[in-house]
């Protein structure tokens, strides 16, 4: 059996990191994880549309802060991608700087979502007030939980004892997961902002039938 090659420390000045050509088990596991999460949210969105088509749905007022939060999450993903790309090129100092900034932006997104929830509760749009309220908190809260999981993966890159190749590989995987969560958020955001009971009734063919 041939020994597994080790990854030596990078020489001073930096050098591009050669990643293994074949798909690592961690990459396949990430694809499976994203597939499962995607199916979960797909089912949640189907339930969201079906419940919206019933007659007791009272839409929430516009939540303008979601636009700001979306921009913050987009910035976090862009900076995280920059960090991963720099790590693969061997620019570790710049990569670590962008890694820190990306984490701060992702945390700001979660804080922004918490502010939105608190503001809605203060305006008497609590979780139990109406099915529209419940689904809003459920969808956005579930997404925030998965993003916190992404922040845990981000925090695991903090130890400096990681080899350069390991750090670059994990950064790349974390960036992929963050991009997936951003794409998922865009789908949720579009559904929350644009779907109406009339559209839901056409999709479900209920014609405004009351429960």
Image (spheres, rainbow, N blue to C red):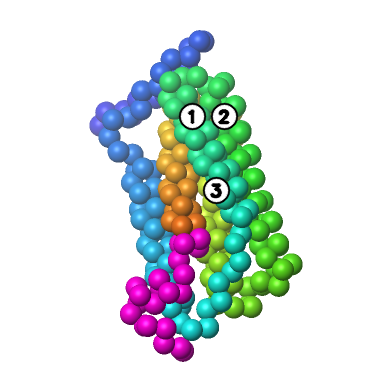
Q: Identify the secondary structure beneath mark 2.
A: helix
Q: Which type of secondary structure does the marked residue at label 1 adopt?
A: helix
Q: Is residue 192 visible?
A: yes
Give whichever of 26, 106 is nearer the camera: 106
Element assignment for label 3: helix
Left or right: 25 in relation to 14: left
Residue 71 position, x and y percent, is 55, 44
Counting from the top left corner in percent of width and height, residue 140 is at 55, 61
Is residue 99 found left or right of 8 in the rendered image? right
Residue at mark 2: 98
| Tag 2–tag 1 contact (CB < 8 Å) | yes
Q: Residue at the location (46% across, 19% down)?
A: 90
Q: Which residue does the image show at 72% across and 68% down from the upper left?
A: 123
- Dot 1 crowding, Cα within 10 Å, few <14, some 14–19, many 20+: some
Q: Is residue 195 magenta?
A: yes
Distance, label 1 to label 3, CA atoms, is 19 Å
Numbered mark located on residue 82 in the image:
1
The residue sitting at 67% across, 51% down in the picture is: 111
- Tag 1 or tag 2, which sits nearer the N-term? 1
User: Magenta residues, as a range?
Assistant: 191-211
Marks 1,3: beta carbons within 8 A: no
What residue would you read off at disc 3? 70
């Amino acid at each position: 059996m041939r020994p597994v090659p080790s990854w030596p420390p990078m020489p001073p000045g930096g050098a591009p990191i050669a990643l293994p050509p074949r798909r690592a088990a961690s990459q396949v596991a990430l694809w499976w994880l994203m597939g499962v999460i995607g199916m979960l949210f797909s089912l949640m969105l189907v339930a969201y549309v079906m419940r919206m088509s019933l007659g007791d749905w009272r839409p929430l007022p516009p939540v303008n802060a979601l636009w700001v939060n979306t921009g913050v999450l987009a910035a976090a993903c862009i900076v995280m991608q920059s960090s991963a790309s720099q790590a693969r090129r061997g620019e570790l100092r710049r990569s670590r700087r962008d890694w820190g900034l990306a984490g701060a932006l992702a945390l700001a997104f979660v804080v922004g979502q918490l502010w939105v929830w608190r503001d809605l509760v203060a305006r008497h749009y609590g979780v139990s007030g109406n099915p529209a309220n419940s689904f809003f908190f459920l969808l956005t809260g579930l997404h925030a939980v998965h993003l916190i999981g992404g922040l845990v993966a981000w925090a695991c890159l903090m130890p400096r004892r990681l080899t350069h190749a390991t750090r670059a590989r994990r950064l790349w995987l974390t960036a992929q997961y963050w991009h997936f969560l951003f794409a998922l958020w865009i789908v949720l955001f579009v559904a929350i902002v644009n779907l109406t009971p009339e559209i839901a009734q056409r999709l479900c063919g209920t014609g405004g039938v009351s429960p």
